Image (spheres, rainbow, N blue to C red):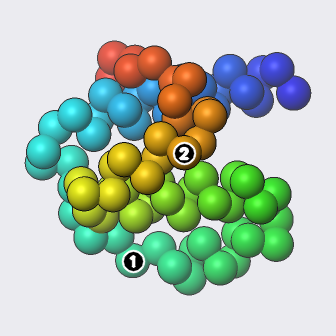
Amino acid sequence: SEVRDQKLVLILGRLKAALQNDGAFMEWTMQPVLDHLQPKLSHANHSLLTALVAALSDHGKMSELDQFLEWRNATSQPLD
């Protein structure tokens, strides 16, 4: 739906803003969560979430997010 898409763009935009800070990166142990969510998500959404978790853990993986249209289209948003 359009509302869901707008929320996704806002969330991704806020993440873009947060990830401009070098201190935002730390190792996340999220594979069990990703495995649990996989049957509930589309392949595209699961792939985006997996790439996002990887980027949150390792700044060097940020460029991998650029393969996702949602990420590329999201504009950095101020953190409230």
Please report contact status of discs 1 and 2: CB closer than 8 Å, yes or no: no
- Position of residue 48 measured from the top left corner of the image (x, y, whole percent): 59, 53
Q: Which amino acid, mark 1?
A: Thr
Quadrant of image for the N terminus: top right
> Which residue position is annotated with label 2?
67
- Mark 1 highlights which residue? 29
Residue at 21% x, 48% y: name it: 24
- Pinpoint residue 60: horizontal percent, then vertical percent: 25, 57
Closer to us: mark 1 or mark 2?
2
Q: Which quarter of the picture shows residue 40? A: bottom right
User: Regarding mark 1 in the picture, which secondary structure is present there?
Assistant: loop
- Within the image, what quadrant is residue 28 found in? bottom left
Q: Position of residue 10 (x, y in %)?
A: 54, 24
- Residue 78, compared with residue 54, is above or below; it is above
Identify the secondary structure beneath mark 2. Answer: helix
Query: Up-down: is 35 above or below 80?
Result: below
Residue 27 x %, y %: 27, 70
Sequence-first tag of 1 and 2: 1
